[in-house]
Image (cartoon, coloured by chain):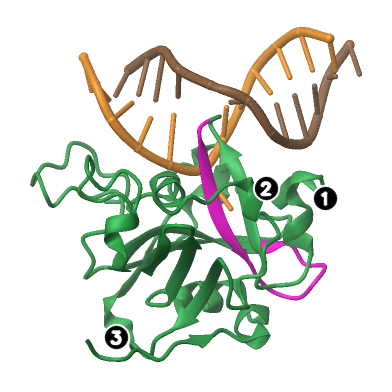
Chain colours: A green, B brown, C orange
Amino acid sequence: MTEVRLSTLPQSFFTRDTHTTARGLLGKLLLRTTERGTIAVRIVEVEAYVGTDDLACHASKGRTPRTEVMFGPPGMAYVYLIYGMYHCLNVVTEKEGFPAAVLIRAAEPVWGEELLSQRAVDAYPTRGPGKLTKALGITRLQNGHDLKLKSELYLADDGVVIDPALVRCTPRIGVDYAGKCSAWPWRYILTSSPYVSGTRKQTGRVTQRRNP
DNA sequence: ACGCTGATGAAG
DNA sequence: TTCATCAGCGTT
């Protein structure tokens, strides 16, 4: 068992332009500790949501109780309930007062895979934003949590370097309602990962490609 | 293509 | 206080 050295991510990582931070999060680790142990997953798919002009961004409605943390300091978790059933985990970015965040859509298990919820019934329990949070036990209880500090939920760098040639951008998923913003290529994926959502390499079938 | 499900924000 | 809507997912 080789020793792995983890570094937390500094505030300066998150204050940058949201797209830079989004790309930077690809390959980083998300660590989740519960009473059962610690799980580490490597981020392979993210989306940027930026400011009030981005009609797909919740902050386009202005400052509301839900979006409050997006207006706060960067590096915090913005977690909300979607479709009455699933939670989505976002990382707040940019300067305090400017609402923006990166949605974590998918990740690859690295350690503690046996602790993932749904592991027994789903070959890819961390593929898709709703499944990822369910697998890691993330709910609104973690809304506003500081992801920069070692804790029950935080981000870290284990030194793995991502080849920029493996990063691809596409339009964001599920934001057709956002008019012209829906076509903006603000989704970033690691093409090398089978955990990226929207593909079904396992069955070899693609019934409908949302991002041709 | 559709139903599940409840928080959310806008309308009244 | 209602109402339409929704950054997903599994099944059809």
Question: Reading the chain from its start, which is encountered first: label 2 or label 3?
Answer: 2
| Amino acid at the residue labelled 3 | Asp
Badge number at residue A163: 3
Could you say which is closer to the camera, residue B8 or residue A20?
B8
Q: Are marks 1 and 3 in contact (CB under 8 Å)?
A: no
* Picture quadrant of residue A158: bottom left
In this rendering, position of residue C12 left or right of residue B8: left
Question: Same chain for marks 2 and 1?
Answer: yes
Tell me residue A23's x, y (percent): 46, 76
Identified at 37% across, 49% down, the residue is A128
Badge number at residue A63: 1
Q: Are marks 2 and 1 in contact (CB under 8 Å)?
A: no
Question: Same chain for marks 2 and 3?
Answer: yes
Q: Which residue in the structure is indicated by mark 2?
A: A58
Q: Is residue A55 visible?
A: no
Question: Reading the chain from its start, which is encountered first: label 1 or label 3?
Answer: 1
Segment colored magenta: A85-100
Dot 3, how many residues are within 10 Å of its Cα: few (below 14), some (14-19), or many (20+)? few
Q: Secondary structure at mark 1?
A: loop
Tell me residue A109's x, y (percent): 30, 64
**Whole-Å distance between the Cαs marked 2 and 1?**
9 Å
Tell me residue A136's x, y (percent): 43, 54
